[in-house]
Structures are given as C-alpha cells and as structure tokens.
Image (tube, rainbow, N blue to C red):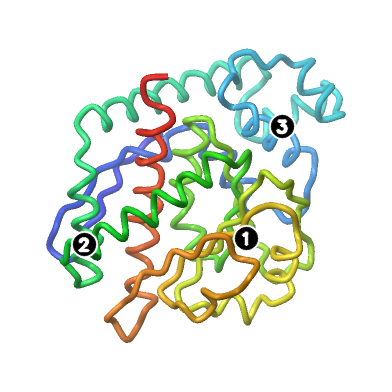
Amino acid sequence: MSFQCYLFIDKYYFIKEEGMNTLLSRLIVYINSCVKKDVIYEIARYIIKNYSYCQNITLKDIMDECYVSRASVTRFCEYFGFHSWNNFQSFLVKTKKVKEQQIESRFSNIDIESIYDHLCYIAKNDSLEFKNNLKKEINALVEIINQSSRIYLFGAVYPLSLAVDFQINMISIGKTVYSDFQSESDYLEPMNEDDLAIILTASGRYVGECKSKFNLICNNAGKKAVISCSNRYSSLQYINHYLYIPTTNKNSFVDFDYYTILILDLIYIEYNLKYCRGK
C-alpha cells in the first residue's frame, strides 16, 4: 500500500513525496521501535545493512550472518506477511525498484534553491548571507556523512519520527542510517571511528535530560554532530559539527519541526547530488 504525503508550510505548497510504500520502510519502523533485540530485529537489521544488493541475499546468507535457522527466517517472513524468503525477497526487490523510480522522478526536475528559500522563509531571514551560511553548514555536514560508514540519529521521539523518511531515502541510496529511540536507556551500540552520531534537539534539552545517553555518545568512537535551534552547547569539545538554526518563534519546537524536515531533506538531496548521481 502506498500513500501520498503533502507538506504545507504556512500557505506554501512545498513538496509531494510518495513514500512509506516500500518494504524497507516497514523494516525501519520495526527496528526503530524494537526494545527487545530478537531474531526478527537481527534479520531486519541485516537486510537494511545490505539493502543496496538485497536481490543477491540468499537464505543461506541470512542463516550464516544472523546465526539463525531456516525456521527462524520463515517466522521472520511470516511476521511481515510473507510465506517464504523467496516471496519476501521478491516483494522487497519490487518495492526497491519503485523507490528508485520515485527518486529518479524527483531528481530529474529538482529545484534545491527553492527548498533553501523555504527554510529561510521559516527562519524569517531572507538575507543572502544567511542563506549562503545555511548552505555552507549543511554541505559541511554532508561531507562528514560521506566520510562516515554509518549514521546514528539521536533525539526525542518526535524529531526522530520526522526523520524516518530521511532514513528511508538515505538507505535507498546506499548510506545506512539508524535511529535510537531509547533515549532513557543506558545502552548504546558501539560505534566505530568512521561512524557519525547526529543529535536532533530543538532547545538543547536532550543534552541535559538525557545526560547518561549523551555522555555515552560523547565517549563513544566516531564523530558527533548536533542540529538545534539553540547554540548553548555549540562550544562542547566533543562535537565535531554544530548546525545552529536561530528561531524568532518563542516556541522553538514549532520551528524545529519544520527545520528537521527541511534540513534532513536538504542533507539527503545534497548528498545524493554530490556523491550518488551519475555513478
């Protein structure tokens, strides 16, 4: 099943995206919300990790890499409504092709400048200096993403929920993105030096209210970035990149919802244009 998602910013029509119609999206939603890291989680994560060449994944690959039995793979497929791995894989590849067609259609006539203009409009700052600085900061983060093997998103539930489409888009073009919805948990998956943690926080409150998780992020290997409407933590020595978007709204959370959608979309677009298109 597919649906069309329309995003309006004030009276302006911004973008139409046909998303969440792929089997990939269901796998992402599952691992994002999964508390118990069970067999279904491990298989789903393996498929996401190897999504770029999912058409070549065999039943034996899953059994060997996930240390599971044939029966476990069958139960996994049945959980998502399929009776076998072949049936599951066939639909996965089919929806992957649909997503690729959607990406091609969008990028064949994309106007990235208009998206930056909308971001400036929300920020109530239409100066060329502000716009150019946005481009500079976003592209600096894109460069870090390109140098990173995996991306981990951290933040409150709502901004991470807004980032699901970003996950789908980035994974669809070969860059693995995970989200940590367990902000109160003391567990953090070990990250490598070439991984990147991105913290989404409107007011910076995540740093204080989820101090235990934040400290784990800072003390883990890998680079760290923050996207926020507050610059109160911009001087922290652990942060490699701080994308600060000032807001004129007393309720910064309202603006940040829009910022999150637009900035992540711009990151995806810039990354795709610079490092994926034409390869």
Question: What amino acid is labelled 3 in the image?
Answer: Phe
On the rendered image, what quadrant is the C terminus found in?
Answer: top left
- Residue found 79% across the figure and 44% down from its top: 38
- Residue found 54% across the figure and 77% down from its top: 233
Q: Is residue 170 above or below residue 100?
A: below
- Residue found 73% across the figure and 71% down from its top: 215
Residue count near mark 3 (Cα–Cα under 10 Å), binned few <14, some 14–19, many ≥20: many
Relative image position of residue 232 (x, y in whole percent): 50, 81
Residue that protrudes farthest toward the left in the picture: 11
Q: Which mark is residue 9?
A: 2
Q: Which residue is mark 3?
A: 76
Q: Which SS class for mark 2? A: strand
> Between tags 1 and 3, which lies in front?
1
Relative image position of residue 58 (x, y in whole percent): 71, 14
60 lies left or right of 89: right
Q: Earlier in the sequence, mark 2 or mark 3?
A: 2
Question: What amino acid is labelled 1 in the image?
Answer: Phe
Question: Camera-side residue: 82 or 249?
Answer: 249
